[in-house]
Image (cartoon, grey):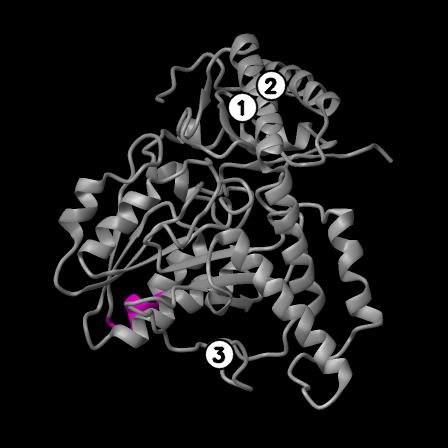
Amino acid sequence: MMKMIYMDNHATTQIDPRVLEVMLPYFTEHYGNPASRQHRFGWVAEEAVEAARNKIAKFLNAEPNEIIFTSGATESNNLAIKGIAEAYAYKGRHIITVATEHKSVLDSCDHLSKAGFKISYLPVDQYGLVDLNILEREINSDTILISVMYANNEIGTIQNINEIAKISTERNIIFHTDATQAVGKLKIDLKNSQIDLLSFSGHKIYGPKGIGVLYIKNKSPKVKLIPQMDGGGHERGLRSGTLNVPAIVGLAKALELCDQFMDEENKRLSEFRNKMQTEFLANLENVFLNGHPSQRIPNNLNISFLHVEDTALIMALKDIAVSSGSACSTANAQGSHVLKALRLSDSRIHSAIRFGLGRFNTAEEVDYVIDKVIVEVKKLRKLSFFKNKKVEL
């Protein structure tokens, strides 16, 4: 079998062996239910959960009672958006979000629109940034929630989150951010921000799948929301269900490693990313970066290779795991909603490839990918029906 090179780290990451190591005892030795408070098995599990909660809170500069464990960012986003909508419907029924959000935000908002809420989808500029003037104009007396992604999962653009949170606070509106692609890559200080709710997942930061966090501000004014899952009243009654102790322990360790190596890792990955971008632009014509040229997370490179279909290039890169900026290889043949929101041409959208670099990528792998992509793009362009056609950008 050929050795695969993994460059799809926005989709998920390999679990760090150091994370797996701390998780293993909670599968076989300390396997108690933390809600079982009548015996030692439960006490040990509960202690592990609370120790992890404290570590996670410290990493985010939050309070431990502001950390709610979920199954992942999708659940956290659903709980935040639907939970706030139900809790504050008496105040208003207008929610503002952005056209480039993750589907778990967009679909949650679509669900609420069918229940009578009005949803405003903010446009973005050519780089994926929200215009703060447009945001302020969209706010009205009925607005109860603004939800804006911290860093985009396709193009890596980082929004001006602190400014957006400040606007929300000044207008007495709750602010939520899906920070799944930002946590572990950017320094987040919740005590010194005006973010009310923040979501993220463990499996994007070399932790386990099936675990996530919803941060809910517990300071004045305290944020309230309606639970979306009923049961045993776990997690302060906000998210019922037996806690996933091994994954919670693993998530805390994953964040500990991010905290320890973030600066070093960001420097290395941004150097890799910049080298790939420079080489593609130098050795190939009609290559275009998608997203902001500088205000972006360090491991993201979304780039369009005109005259090459994204699916054809992915198939040609048999030993490299990357993803398409377009969703035409799935049930949605319309292409990436993020790239469409940038108002790119169909040519740009359907020739876009997302490279997601990660902790375990090496310099040798980066060099191999650069050479392989350049060779395959040139080869496919020779075969392309569109190679001599003028295309819109």
Q: CA distance from mark 2 to mark 1?
A: 7 Å
Task: Return the mark for residue 236.
Answer: 3
Q: Label 3: how many residues lie within 10 Å, few (<14), some (14-19) or many (20+)? A: few
Under mark 2, the amino acid is: Val
**Quick one: which residue is furthest to the right in this view?**
1
Q: CA distance from mark 1 to mark 3?
A: 52 Å
Q: Tell whether label 3 touches label 1 (CB within 8 Å).
A: no
Task: Estimate the x, y position of residue 230 in percent, counting from the top left.
Answer: 49, 84
N-terminal label among 1 and 3 = 3
Q: Is residue 342 left or right of residue 73?
A: left
Secondary structure of residue under mark 3: loop
* Residue 377 - label: 2
State the predominant SS element of the stretch in magenta: helix
Residue 26 versus residue 302: which sits nearer the camera?
26
- Where in the figure is residue 160, as x and y percent of width and height? 33, 40
The stretch in magenta equals 111-116
Label 2: state its secondary structure: helix
Residue 283, placed above or below residue 32: above
Judged from the image, the secondary structure of the residue bearing numbered disc 1 is loop
Check contact, mark 2 vs mark 1: CB within 8 A. Answer: yes
- Residue 40 relative to residue 233: left or right: right
If the image is split into quadrants, where does the N terminus sit? Answer: top right
Q: Position of residue 217 (x, y in %)?
A: 38, 64
